[in-house]
Image: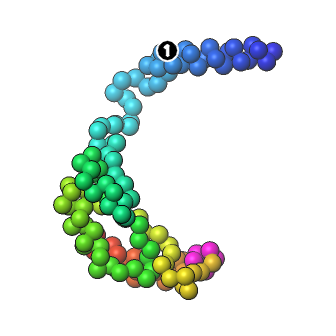
Amino acid sequence: MKLSTATALVSALIIGVALPASAGSQTGTDPIKTSSAASAFGSYDPYGDFSNDKSATIEELFLPWEDVDLSTLPLADAYAQQRGRSLLITIEPWTWSKDWRITPPELRDGILSGKYDANMQAICSLV
């Protein structure tokens, strides 16, 4: 019985691989469109290892939403623009300061109470 199940599974996989058009939607009805833009390459590159890489089109930044010097954000944008890249900014719920670390429940309560709204608005106003 186990051998029959395994044989049926392998057969189904082979048929699915050999005949992918019959297993999917009809041409033109697939809601997902792909293009070369869908596979853009970028990196988080704090040390500038990819600064001269022409294939990178995205410059990733990770910002804490507290205790961050926002005056450097325009510098990062200028760096990306000089290289023909777009910025991808990830804002994370932490701080650089070890003294300001909070527990997950404190973080949740702060988010729900709007404690961090001003920080987020300040970051978003620069973008």
Callout 1: few (<14), some (14-19), or many (20+) C-alpha neighbours within 10 Å?
A: few
Q: Is residue 72 left or right of residue 19?
A: left
Q: Is residue 23 above or below residue 59?
A: above
82 in relation to 36, above or below? below
**Relative horizontal placement of residue 35, taking residue 17 as reference (left or right):** left
Is residue 118 rendered to the left or right of residue 12?
left
User: In this picture, is 43 found above or below 115?
Assistant: above
Measured as percent of width and height from the top left, residue 17 is found at 51, 19
> What residue is shown with label 1?
18
Residue for point 41% across, 71% down = 63
Of 49 and 35, the residue lying toward us: 49
Residue 16 appears left or right of 33: right
Q: Which stretch is magenta?
A: 104-109
- Type of amino acid at the residue the image marks with label 1: Ala
Horizontal and vertical percent position of residue 127:
28, 70
Magenta span contains residue 119: no
**Quarter residue 77 falls in:** bottom left
Looking at the image, the residue that sits furthest to the right is 1
Towards the viewer: 73 or 46: 46
